[in-house]
Image (cartoon, rainbow, N blue to C red):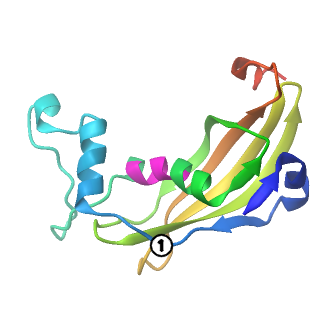
């Protein structure tokens, strides 16, 4: 979906997008583990990652990191470049075994104009196919700086 920041105040409380289903493979979890030092050469032992039934589980932080990719793929924001400003709340509610498909539904919760730019809060519900509810819910803050503003000014106003 394509928007501009000027559209956002009228979209508060509305769904911005619901992504297509994306499969999460063992290879994705392995690549994430390697990139985040969850590997034997760093830990000094094999990393854990299995569920109680012996299934290999997807790391919660891999699910969280996917929000950037989902937003970049699903949300075309004309004339604006966002900066990751932080998270208000993240909950991992259900385990996600590798091999499952996931999707994200993003809802716009808040838009605040600041002297340095615009602060946008989205609620992101990541669903795992067949899980019966969200596997993760994350309230994510993105900051869109005005031309010439420095990112450090985002929270000072």
Relative vertical location of residue 89 with respect to residue 11 in this rendering, above or below: above
126 in the magenta segment: no
Residue 112: x and y in percent read 85, 40
> What kind of element bears circle 1?
loop
Mark 1 is surrounded, within 10 Å at the Cα level, by few (under 14), some (14 to 19) or many (20 or more) other residues, namely some
- The structure residue drawn at horizontal position 11% and vertical position 31%, both measured from the top left corner, is 41
The stretch in magenta equals: 62-67
Residue on which the image places disc 1: 21
- The structure residue drawn at horizontal position 67% and vertical position 66%, both measured from the top left corner, is 17
- The structure residue drawn at horizontal position 71% and vertical position 37%, both measured from the top left corner, is 81
Quadrant holding the N terminus: bottom right
The main secondary structure of the magenta stretch is helix
Relative vertical location of residue 153 with respect to residue 4 in this rendering, above or below: above
Residue 58: x and y in percent read 32, 58
Which residue appears farthest toward the left when viewing the image?
45
Residue 143: x and y in percent read 72, 35
Position of residue 62 in the picture relative to residue 44 (left or right): right
Image-quadrant location for residue 115: top right
Which residue appears farthest toward the front when viewing the image?
79
């Amino acid at each position: 979906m394509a928007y501009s920041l000027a559209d956002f105040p009228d979209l508060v409380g509305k769904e911005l997008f619901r992504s297509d289903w994306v499969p999460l493979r063992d290879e994705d979890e392995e690549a994430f583990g390697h990139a985040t030092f969850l590997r034997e050469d760093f830990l000094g032992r094999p990393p854990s990652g299995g569920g109680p039934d012996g299934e290999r589980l997807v790391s919660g932080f891999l699910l969280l990191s996917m929000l950037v990719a989902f937003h970049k793929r699903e949300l075309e924001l004309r004339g604006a470049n966002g900066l990751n400003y932080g998270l208000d709340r993240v909950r991992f509610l259900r385990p996600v075994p590798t091999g499952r498909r996931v999707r994200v539904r993003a809802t716009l919760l808040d838009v605040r104009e600041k002297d340095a730019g615009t602060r946008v809060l989205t609620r992101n519900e990541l669903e795992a196919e067949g899980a019966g509810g969200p596997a993760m819910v994350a309230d994510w803050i993105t900051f869109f700086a005005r031309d010439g503003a420095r990112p450090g000014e985002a929270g000072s106003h």
